[in-house]
Amino acid sequence: MAHKTLLLASVLAASMGRVAAAPPAVTPTPPVDLVPTPPAGRARLSKPLFKGVELYSWQQAGTWCFSLLPGTNRNKEPSEVRHPTAAVCSVALLKARLATLAPGELVVWETGGEHASCPAPLREELTRYCASIGIVLR
């Protein structure tokens, strides 16, 4: 019904020598595949993801930021890695996200290019934390 109304308005406007205004353009935010969250009532996912999880890190204004994304067979774009729904700029928030992964999950820390490896003490802290909750961090 709305389509017919819009079409009728366009026809009327054109017949009167005017062109109907187009609806404003909306620039969609590119979709980002995120690591799923556990179902309601569960603290962790029940099984590891098929291709594991990728961990990215970078420095932003002197703070280390991280994102966890599902493993794939392709390189992620910076816009995906640093997308606001994927990124956290806190070790505590990263640990909270890691804690929702299934026991036995494989997390691969992606480095190189725009993705920096954080200082050894922080890397060791995160490796120990993952081991304590049954996750393998490589």
Image (tube, rainbow, N blue to C red):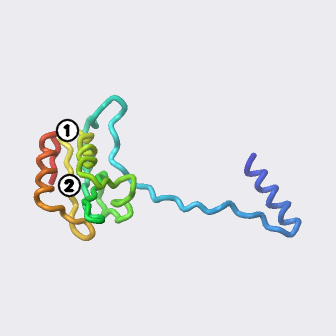
Q: Which residue is mark 2?
A: 108
Q: Quadrant of the C terminus?
A: bottom left
Question: Residue 105 location in percent, x, y?
Answer: 20, 44
Could you say whether the residue bearing mark 2 is in a helix, strand or loop?
strand
Q: Looking at the image, do the residues carrying marks 1 and 2 touch, with CB atoms under 8 Å apart?
A: no
Taking depth in this image into account, of 80 and 75 the one nearest to the observer is 80
Residue for point 83% across, 68% down: 18
Residue for point 34% across, 41% down: 37
Which circle marks residue 27 in the picture? none
Question: Residue 28 location in percent, x, y?
Answer: 52, 59
Taking depth in this image into account, of 95 and 107 the one nearest to the observer is 95
In the image, is residue 93 above or below residue 57?
A: above
Q: Is residue 87 left or right of residue 110?
A: right
Whichever of callouts 1 and 2 sits on the residue coming sooner in the sequence is 1
Residue for point 77% across, 63% down: 20
Q: Which residue, as the protein is rendered here, is positioned at the far top?
A: 41
Residue 17 placement: quadrant: bottom right
Taking depth in this image into account, of 23 and 49 the one nearest to the observer is 23
Question: Residue 6 location in percent, x, y?
Answer: 76, 54
Q: Which residue, as the protein is rendered here, is positioned at the far right?
A: 16
Residue 44 placement: quadrant: top left
Q: Which residue is mark 1?
A: 103
Question: Residue 126 location in percent, x, y?
Answer: 16, 50
Q: CA distance from mark 1 to mark 2?
A: 15 Å
**Mark 1 packing: few (<14 Cα in 10 Å), some, or many (20+)?**
some
